[in-house]
Image (tube, coloured by chain):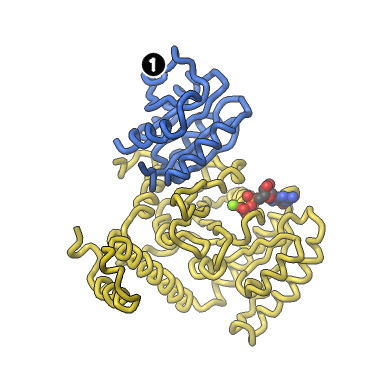
Chain colours: A blue, B yellow
């Protein structure tokens, strides 16, 4: 598996201040060959979408623990669309209750990676998604 | 995909990706004729941690205030092991990250070891014609970044830290003959004053005709601190002064030739890498001289011809 040449934005929306998970996934993606851009904490969907466009990433990973993931995903999808960048993929990670998964997929998320998954499984899933 | 995006910003962004991902053959297609250089190019170089990214965000904000549209190319190192990278400069540019008049693109250094990415020159050309007025390039700050950035930008800013070691290192490496503007950054820390004095004494020599064919520009030595907004106004003014001086005083033909030299060298280097990467083991088992000669023959064929 190689993510060589892929550009991925790891973004941290929402109000929580824990970005250990985001940093771990960023490093793992780097080690898998990707070019990773990290936004830092507490970014709005609008900010994230703008950065995704300027950096021309293949995917945006939203790292979320705060519980407002539904709104954040919906807003990010909308902001990307408004910037003519609906083709940029979105995946989410963090604590996402299973009940919410179907709704997020319907909203346009391409993958949901929870803390129960191993890093290798996450990387393999992202690789598959970006190869498609 | 979205070649003709209805979002002009996205269009420029995609154009940069196409250049970044291009093979040498594809790159050459775009370079039979270069666009006119409209973007003023400012290079910011200095060791990792010197505060380049922070300084660029302050500087860019200042220049936007005066009505400029500013693009930033920030280069971060590629891991030689995984070939991946963490592009972290942007975090320090947070304050200006969503300013509509500032465009920031993070790029990996890839194979290059000179503090730039091997396609930086191509990217700078690809930024022409998208409505921006200037571009600020942040180097990785290692190796011979100062020399390379000198070749492709108009004004070079060298960022140093107020630690005596930094000045001595810079002097030894000959860096104090390379920049147009010297900045002792983090001037809120002790030692900045002293260090600025040391550098000014050295930098004054740069203007003397017997050094480097000295050309009359006396590089200013400034002190900046992220805690002192006015210090960036002084840097902004120094860049404008250099720009004005440069307009009338430098040999523009010589600059153009130096740029072409650097760019062609980069293209040949990349092309050689492309060929060496696909060279069969059996061929690589020969002597360096034989490999070199085989490579030369392959280089003589235009890239793209007779390839699969
Ligand atoms: N004390 C102080 N710290 C600064 C200043 N400018 C930047 N820094 C800090 O220096 C570190 C490196 O800054 P950064 O801009 O990333 O440096 P770069 O690696 O050269 O791009 C960060 O922790 C900054 O917060 C300054 O003027 N004063
Ligand atoms: Mg930096």
Q: Residue furthest bottom?
A: B210
Q: Quadrant of the N terminus of chain B?
A: top left
Q: Residue at x 61, y 25 (%)?
A: A16
Task: Confirm whether residue B66 shows in the render.
Answer: no
The image quadrant that residue B301 belongs to is: bottom left
> Can you give x and y, in whole percent of width and height, for residue B151 in the image?
50, 70
Q: Quadrant of the C terminus of chain B?
A: bottom left
Task: Confirm whether residue A16 shows in the render.
Answer: yes
> Can you give x and y, in whole percent of width and height, for residue B7 in the image?
39, 39
Q: Secondary structure at mark 1?
A: helix
Q: Residue at x 65, y 67 (%)?
A: B181
Task: Say which residue label 1 marks.
Answer: A102
The answer to whether residue A27 is left or right of residue B126 is right
Q: Residue at x 52, y 50 (%)?
A: B69
Q: Is residue B97 above or below residue B211?
A: above
Q: Is residue B115 above or below residue A126?
A: below
The image quadrant that residue A59 belongs to is: top left
Q: Chain of mark 1?
A: A
> Can you give x and y, in whole percent of width and height, for residue B39 in the image?
48, 59
Q: Residues within 10 Å of mark 1 (few under 14, many from 20)?
A: few
> Can you give x and y, in whole percent of width and height, for residue B30 in the image?
31, 61
Q: Is residue A71 above or below residue B177?
A: above
């Amino acid at each position: 598996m190689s993510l060589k040449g892929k550009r991925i934005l790891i973004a941290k929306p929402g109000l929580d201040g824990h970005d250990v998970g985001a940093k771990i996934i960023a490093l793992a993606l780097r080690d898998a060959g990707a070019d990773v851009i990290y936004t830092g904490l507490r970014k709005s969907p609008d900010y994230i979408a703008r950065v995704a466009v300027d950096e021309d990433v293949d995917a945006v990973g939203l790292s979320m623990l705060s519980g407002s993931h539904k709104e954040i995903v919906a807003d990010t999808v909308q902001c990307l669309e408004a910037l003519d960048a609906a083709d940029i993929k979105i995946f989410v990670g963090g604590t996402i209750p299973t009940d919410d998964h179907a709704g997020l997929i319907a909203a346009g998320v391409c993958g949901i990676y929870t803390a129960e998954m191993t890093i290798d499984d996450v990387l393999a899933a992202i690789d598959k998604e970006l190869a498609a | 995909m979205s070649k003709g995006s209805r979002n002009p910003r996205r269009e420029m962004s995609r154009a940069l990706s196409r250049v970044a991902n291009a093979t040498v053959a594809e790159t050459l297609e775009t370079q039979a004729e270069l666009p006119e250089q409209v973007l003023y190019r400012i290079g910011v170089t200095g060791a990792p941690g010197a505060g380049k990214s922070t300084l660029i965000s302050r500087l860019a904000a200042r220049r936007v205030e005066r009505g400029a549209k500013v693009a930033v190319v920030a280069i971060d190192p590629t891991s030689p092991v995984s070939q991946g990278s963490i592009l972290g400069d942007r975090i320090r540019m947070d304050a200006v990250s969503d300013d509509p008049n500032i465009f920031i693109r993070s790029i990996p250094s890839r194979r290059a070891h000179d503090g730039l990415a091997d396609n930086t020159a191509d990217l700078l050309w690809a930024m022409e014609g998208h409505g921006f007025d200037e571009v600020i390039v942040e180097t990785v700050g290692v190796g011979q970044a100062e020399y390379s950035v000198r070749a492709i930008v108009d004004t070079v800013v060298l960022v140093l830290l107020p630690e005596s070691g930094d000045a001595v290192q810079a002097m030894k490496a000959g860096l104090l003959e390379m920049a147009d503007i010297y900045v002792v950054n983090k001037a809120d820390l002790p030692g900045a004053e002293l260090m600025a004095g040391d550098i000014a004494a050295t930098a004054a020599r740069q203007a003397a005709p017997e050094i480097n064919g000295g050309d009359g520009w006396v590089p200013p030595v400034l002190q900046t601190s992220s805690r002192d907004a006015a210090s960036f106004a002084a840097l902004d003014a120094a860049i404008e002064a250099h720009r004005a001086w440069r307009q009338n005083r430098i040999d523009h033909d010589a600059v153009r030739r130096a740029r072409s030299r650097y760019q062609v060298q980069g293209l040949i280097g990349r092309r050689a890498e492309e060929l060496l990467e696909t060279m069969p083991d059996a061929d690589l088992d020969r002597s360096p001289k034989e490999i070199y000669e085989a490579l030369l023959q392959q280089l003589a064929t235009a890239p793209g011809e007779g390839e699969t």
